[in-house]
Amino acid sequence: MKETINKYGNRLSAIFCSIFGHHFGVTKEITSHIKEYKCVHCNKEVTTDASGNLSELTPELQDINNTLEHIYQKRHNSNQQVA
C-alpha cells in the first residue's frame, strides 16, 4: 500500500476521499459475491452486506465474514473431493 511521508497524510487522504471519493481495492474474497475492500488512500474498510451494498466493516461484520468464509471453503472443498 502507498504510505504518506508527511505528518498530515491521514488528513490529506481524508480530504482527497471526501472530494473525489474512495478508491477501493479488494483485500479479501469471502465468496464469489461477498468481498472485503479497502480504500487505497485513507484505508477505510468496507464489505458487501446482505443486499449487495457496501457497508463499513465493523468487528461484527468481520466475524460474520470469517464464519461465512469458513463454511464456504468447507463446502467447496468437500464438493471437490466427492467429484
Image (tube, rainbow, N blue to C red):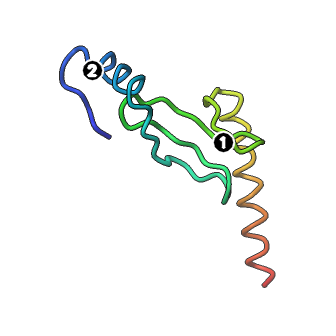
Q: In the picture, residue 55 is in which quadrant? A: top right
Left or right of 61? Residue 8 is left
Amino acid type, residue under disc 1 in the picture: Thr
Find residue 8 and name its label: none
Amino acid type, residue under disc 2 in the picture: Gly
User: On the image, numbered disc 2 is attached to which residue?
Assistant: 9
Nearer-the-camera pick, 61 or 66: 61
Circle 2: is it few (<14), some (14-19), or many (20+) Cα within 10 Å? some
Which residue in the rendered view is the most extreme toward the bottom? 83
- The structure residue drawn at horizontal position 52% and vertical position 33%, both measured from the top left corner, is 45
- The structure residue drawn at horizontal position 77% and vertical position 42%, both measured from the top left corner, is 50
Circle 1: is it few (<14), some (14-19), or many (20+) Cα within 10 Å? some
Please state, as top left, top right, bottom left or bottom right, where the C terminus lies in the image: bottom right
Q: Secondary structure at mark 1?
A: strand
| Residue 36 higher or lower than 42, as above or below | below
The alpha-carbon separation of the residues under discs 1 and 2 comes to 27 Å
Q: Position of residue 53 (x, y in %)?
A: 68, 40
- The structure residue drawn at horizontal position 64% and vertical position 51%, both measured from the top left corner, is 30
Q: Position of residue 42 (x, y in %)?
A: 39, 28
User: On the image, numbered disc 1 is attached to which residue?
Assistant: 48
The answer to whether mark 1 and mark 2 are in CB contact below 8 A is no
Q: In the picture, residue 23 is in which quadrant? A: top left
Q: In the picture, residue 3 is in which quadrant? A: top left
